[in-house]
Image (cartoon, helix red, strand yellow):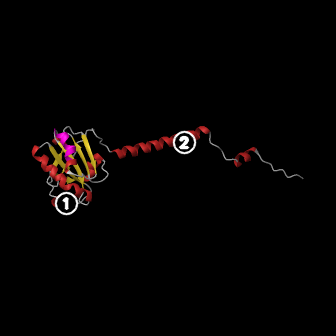
Amino acid sequence: MENKSLITPAADEKARPRQLPAWVIVLAFVLLLAFLALIWWGLNRSQQGSVQINDSVPPFTLTGFDGKQYATKDLAGKVIVVNFWASWCDPCKQEAADLETAWQYYRPGGKVVFMGVDWVDTEPEARSYLSQFGISYLNGPDLRTAISQIFRIKGVPETYILDKTGHLKNVKIGPFSSLGEIRGMIDPLVN
């Protein structure tokens, strides 16, 4: 007697894995590529910052260590130098004296305003830093990091220079190397 195994068509289908139609595989691959492209675009855009050279900078208010509020909208017609710093930042200490000297140079003309924005710091250490370097221009903490989010800073020091119309004209990532470098960015905007 022959032993024939009886395989029914239904049992044969269960033994073989089902394949997806080609169009489903292609569609899934296209959707995956689109998703990855969207992620890349978002990351690339976030790295650029929200304000680019020649863009108008949204108005913001800095609450100074003196308790007063200083709004950029009230400074229309002036060049604004926004310097992000922290007391724990060694490169910030390298540029502190030059920034103060530049402020003293421009102060009498009244055409340039310096705003120091203390980033991720504590008030006692920040006040000590200002005293140590004799910094007399406007300074205040970046409460809730509201100002640094406008520029999407990556660290300190970073300096952003706005022209008289409130447009971003110069960016310095890292410390200034000299008073000449600072003046070289500001002088063309004052005249």
SS category of the residue bearing label 2: helix
SS category of the residue bearing label 1: helix
Q: Residue furthest right?
A: 1
Q: Residue furthest left?
A: 108
Dividing the image into 4 quarters, which one contains the C terminus?
Answer: top left
C-alpha gap between disc 2 and disc 1: 55 Å
Taking the image as drawn, is residue 61 in sight?
Answer: no
* Number of residue marks: 2
Q: Which residue lies under the disc numbered 2?
A: 29
Which amino acid, mark 1? Tyr
* Dot label at residue 129: 1
* Dot label at residue 100: none
Provide the major secondary structure of the magenta segment.
helix
Instruction: Decide if residue 53 is on the left or right side of residue 65.
Output: right
Range of residues picked out in magenta: 182-191
Which amino acid, mark 2? Phe
The image position of residue 63, as x and y in percent, is 18, 51
Q: Are marks 2 and 1 in contact (CB under 8 Å)?
A: no
Rendered residue at 70%/47% (across/down): 16
The image position of residue 145, as x and y in percent, is 27, 52
- Which is more toward the observer, 131 or 74? 131
